[in-house]
Amino acid sequence: MAGTLYFIPVPLADGTTPQQVLPAEVVQRMHSLRHFIVENEKTARQFLSASGHPVPIRELTLAVLTKDTPPKDLPKLLQVVQQGTDVGVMSEAGCPGIADPGAALAAVAHQKGIRVAPLIGPSSLLLALMASGLNGQRFTFLGYLPSDKAERIKTIKGIEFDSRKQQATQLFIETPYRNQHVLEDLIGNLQPTTRLCVACNITAQDELIVTKTVADWKKSILPDVHKKPTVFLLLA
């Protein structure tokens, strides 16, 4: 009988311990596992150590799954699960499978009849939406915006059009070193009445979640979101 593939959330912010953001049952389940598939081996070992894993970290088996892992290699990662061993999957931050290479692994697991079990933990997208005051009944996550400025501005205007037409909140993220450019492009190209939420460093001590109309953002000193994990949300 095949084992179970457990998707284990990890803290969003540096300096946050597993015990601060994960239920005790999730930590216990993680401590029962000896095999893990992780996005970054170094940070995964640090996380497992900080959680108080009862097995010496050097004795745990960690396989690496990144966005560059070829699709043909995914079945090999699941061989140990097919042989009856439970395995944990961990992203670099937040929930595996959401804007994360774990999604492709879950798809292959379903094809092979392997149970995929998501565990409870922090999701920057849902936490941002919860606190934004925007429409939580109808929303769309769009992933990353284009890196090219002209394409990004074109996309921003299209997102705003869709939001107005559907009356739906639009969520998106960006590589942290481009966050400040994205924020400036949003404020410079959205309509004054569109509401924009900036959710930065969620769960960290310097967490910032602010929603204003674009007109009000233009009157404000913009927050520094450079190289800080940030979720952007808008509702036209």
Image: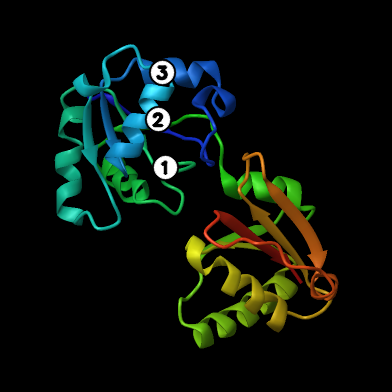
The foreground one among 41 and 196 is: 41
Q: Position of residue 6 (x, y in %)?
A: 37, 29
Q: Which mark is residue 47?
A: 2
Q: Earlier in the sequence, mark 2 or mark 1?
A: 2
> In the rendered structure, are the residues bearing label 2 and label 1 in contact, judged by CB atoms less than 8 Å apart?
no
SS of the residue under disc 2: helix
Please identify the quadrant where the C terminus is shown.
bottom right
The foreground one among 104 and 24 is: 24
As drawn, the residue found furthest toward the bottom would be 150
Q: Residue at point 54% right, 41% down?
A: 13
**Is 169 located above or below residue 32 in the figure?**
below
Q: Is residue 27 left or right of residue 195?
A: left
Residue 54 visible in the picture: yes
Mark 3 highlights which residue?
A: 29
Mark 1 highlights which residue?
A: 96
The foreground one among 176 and 231 is: 176
**Is 96 located above or below residue 84 in the figure?**
below
Q: Earlier in the sequence, mark 2 or mark 3?
A: 3
Label 2 to label 1, Cα distance in Å?
A: 14 Å
Residue 28 position by quadrant: top left
Q: Is residue 72 left or right of residue 20?
A: left
**Is 102 located above or below residue 230 in the figure?**
above
